[in-house]
Image (spheres, grey):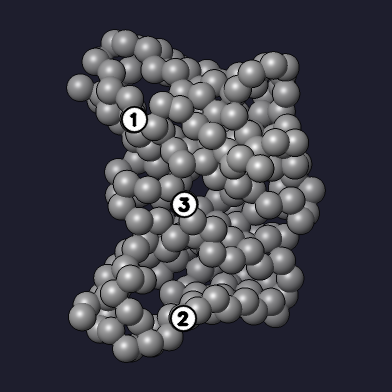
């Protein structure tokens, strides 16, 4: 059974600081997704990582994938308050039929 | 091109009533997935359907829950005799298929509250 673990689960940081969220998964996967969710809202797709060594950046967020280590990271650079949200990683199992989500990282950026 | 459409967005039901949640996939998508998000938790897979077929229902509770995706019309997630523990956000997603490279797109979600 595919397991996906994120850490930290809760992250409080000051504006302007950098931090990394980690996503470990237990079995081989073809794709890894990062999503953002604001309270009471749906999932906003941030990144889709398809291959080992993939790195994608959008604004202050950068995601990377190491399939050998079964690890993805979401790096936040110079955080701003608007980044406060819950961030989920999700892994597509080998069958490609469904996503398994991590528990989510609740990020709070303090002014 | 409209995205994945879910309705109702918010639904309130009394204990023992039935809840029906609808999902229209993106145009051209024939693969639909339902996920449930309990308060303060991540999303959990429930069921994966293609037109007229249930492909994987390993995440569905054994009783009271059912799903269908008919040849015509939206996919429906049906919860009979709802209980307070069914209160959650239910998300539908769709894709072109399970093959690598086919992105899964999520709908806006349906929030069920059981009182």
Specify which label sits upstream in the sequence, 2 or 3.
3
Residue tagged 1: B10
Residue tagged 2: A60
Rendered image quadrant of residue B26: top right
In the rendered image, the residue lying farthest to the right is B99
In the rendered image, the residue lying farthest to the front is B1
CA distance separating discs 1 and 2? 33 Å
At numbered mark 3, what does the secondary structure look like: helix, strand or loop? strand
Residue tagged 3: A43
> Which residue is found at the position 35% from the left and 82% from the top?
A79
Question: Mark 3 falls within which chain?
Answer: A
* Badges 1 and 2, same chain: no
Q: Position of residue B105 (x, y in %)?
A: 60, 47
- Above or below: residue A108 compared with residue A104: below
The local crowd at label 3, few if under 14, some if 14 to 19, many if 20 or more residues have their Cα within 10 Å, is: many
Q: Nearer the viewer, residue A37 or A70?
A: A37
The local crowd at label 1, few if under 14, some if 14 to 19, many if 20 or more residues have their Cα within 10 Å, is: few
Q: Position of residue B77 (x, y in %)?
A: 51, 22
The answer to whether B18 appears left or right of B57 in the picture is left
Q: Position of residue B15 (x, y in %)?
A: 25, 15
The local crowd at label 2, few if under 14, some if 14 to 19, many if 20 or more residues have their Cα within 10 Å, is: few
Question: Mark 1 falls within which chain?
Answer: B
> Which residue is found at the position 69% from the left and 77% from the top?
A54
The answer to whether A11 appears left or right of B70 in the picture is left
> Which residue is found at the position 31% from the left and 52% from the top?
A39
Is residue B29 at all visible to an observer of this figure? Answer: yes
At numbered mark 2, what does the secondary structure look like: helix, strand or loop? loop
- Above or below: residue B31 compared with residue B103: above
Q: Position of residue B5 (x, y in %)?
A: 54, 34
> Which residue is found at the position 62% from the left and 70% from the top?
A70
């Amino acid at each position: 059974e595919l397991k996906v673990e994120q850490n930290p689960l809760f992250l409080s940081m000051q504006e302007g600081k950098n931090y990394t969220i980690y996503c470990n998964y237990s079995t081989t996967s073809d794709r890894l997704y990062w999503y953002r969710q604001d309270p009471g809202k749906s999932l906003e797709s941030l990144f889709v990582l398809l291959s080992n060594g993939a790195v994608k950046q959008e604004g202050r967020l950068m995601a990377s994938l190491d399939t050998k280590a079964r690890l993805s990271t979401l790096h936040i650079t110079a955080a701003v308050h608007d980044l406060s949200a819950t961030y989920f990683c999700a892994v597509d199992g080998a069958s490609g039929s469904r996503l398994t989500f991590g528990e989510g990282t609740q990020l709070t950026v303090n002014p | 091109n409209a995205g994945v459409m879910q309705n109702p967005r918010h639904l309130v039901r009394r204990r023992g009533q039935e809840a029906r949640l609808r999902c229209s996939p993106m145009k051209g998508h024939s693969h639909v997935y339902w996920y449930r998000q309990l308060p303060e938790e991540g999303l959990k897979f429930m069921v994966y359907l293609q037109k007229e077929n249930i492909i994987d229902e390993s995440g569905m509770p054994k009783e009271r829950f059912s799903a269908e995706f008919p040849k015509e019309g939206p996919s429906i997630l049906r919860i009979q005799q709802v209980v307070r523990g069914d209160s959650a956000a239910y998300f539908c997603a769709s894709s072109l298929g399970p093959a690598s490279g086919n992105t899964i797109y999520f709908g806006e979600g349906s929030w069920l509250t059981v009182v």
